[in-house]
């Protein structure tokens, strides 16, 4: 008799916005979502994926938690939140999704340079760090280059007429380990743990 296979969990690291931030993005993108002919992503599921890990054996989830805590402890947030501004939509035809595309906060780099400040490491650096650390530990994250985006609709056949949206700024002082389960209505997400990047003592320096 073959031994039973260890259960797995479908996991990823993400920037996990609060309800107010999700609501603002849903409001800004609603016309585009309505006109694309796709299925809107439920507002509570809007997020930015940092590192998709796929099926992870139950026994290794604690190892991922340790990696995330270590990354959060050493990541150079400099007491500042990670900032992403979403101001346009993109239709990714192969995946049949409509996305809100994000960039770093507009003007942040020039403003910091004028003040003689070092720029805070951002979402691309955090994504790369998590992918490097999990790969080194024997996990198999998706290694496609990070591109800040939020999927707002699925099963999209065509792009909406207008791709520009009113800019929405998302701020993050933490990232999260998320479990994804597939229900008949689509993916359902749950937060396993959150990891603070902006420590209180740094934020008040």
Image: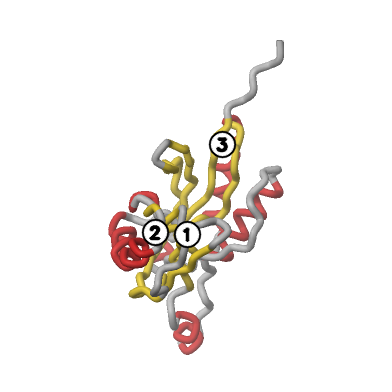
Q: Return the x and y of residue 95 as percentages of the image width and height.
A: 55, 56
Q: Is residue 22 visible?
A: yes
Q: Secondary structure at mark 2?
A: loop
Task: Name which quarter of the figure residue 173 lies in.
Answer: bottom left
Q: Farthest residue toward the top?
A: 1
Residue behind mark 3: 61
For label 3, count other residues whose C-alpha is less than 10 Å away and answer few (under 14), some (14-19) or many (20+): some
Q: Say above or below: 65 vs 21.
A: above
Alpha carbon separation for disc pair 3 and 1: 37 Å
Q: Is residue 79 visible?
A: no
* Residue at screen point 71% across, 10% down: 1
Q: Which label sits in the foreground, 3 or 1?
A: 1
Label pair 1/2, CB-CB below 8 angstroms: yes
Q: CA distance from mark 2 to mark 3?
A: 38 Å
The reply to whether the C-beta atoms of the residues labelled 3 and 1 are less than 8 Å apart is: no
The C terminus sits in image quarter: bottom left
- Residue at position x 60%, y 37% in the image: 56
Tell me if label 2 and label 3 are in contact, CB under 8 Å: no
125, 75: nearer the viewer: 125
Q: Earlier in the sequence, mark 3 or mark 1?
A: 3
User: Could you say which is closer to the camera, residue 22 or residue 71?
Assistant: 22
Gap between marks 1 and 2 measured at Cα:
7 Å
Q: From the viewer's perspective, tell me whether residue 19 is left or right of residue 155.
A: left
Disc 2 crowd, CA 10 A, few/some/many (<14, 14-19, 20+):
some
* 1 or 2: tag closer to the N-terminus: 2
Residue 147, position in %: x, y? 55, 65
Residue picked out by circle 1: 157
Secondary element type, mark 3:
helix
Image colouring: secondary structure
Query: Where does the image place residue 117, in percent across and percent down from the top left?
Result: 50, 81
Q: Residues within 10 Å of mark 1 (few under 14, many from 20)?
A: some
Q: Which residue is mark 2?
A: 37
């Amino acid at each position: 008799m073959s031994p039973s296979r260890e259960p797995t969990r479908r996991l990823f690291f993400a920037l996990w916005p609060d309800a107010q931030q999700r609501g603002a993005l849903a409001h800004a993108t609603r016309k585009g979502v309505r006109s694309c002919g796709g299925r809107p992503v439920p507002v509570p599921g809007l997020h930015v994926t940092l590192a998709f890990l796929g099926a992870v054996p139950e026994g290794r989830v604690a190892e991922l938690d340790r990696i995330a805590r270590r990354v959060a402890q050493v990541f150079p947030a400099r007491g500042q939140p990670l900032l992403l501004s979403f101001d346009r939509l993109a239709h990714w035809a192969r995946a049949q999704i409509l996305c809100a595309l994000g960039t770093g906060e507009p003007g942040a780099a020039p403003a910091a340079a004028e003040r003689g400040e070092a720029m805070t490491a951002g979402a691309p650096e955090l994504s790369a760090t998590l992918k490097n650390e999990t790969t080194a530990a024997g996990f198999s994250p998706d290694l496609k280059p990070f591109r800040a985006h939020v999927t707002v609709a699925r099963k999209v056949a065509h792009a909406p007429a207008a791709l520009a949206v009113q800019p929405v700024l998302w701020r993050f002082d933490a990232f999260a380990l998320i479990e994804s389960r597939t229900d008949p209505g689509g993916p359902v997400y749950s937060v396993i743990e959150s990891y603070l990047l902006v420590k209180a003592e740094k934020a008040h320096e």
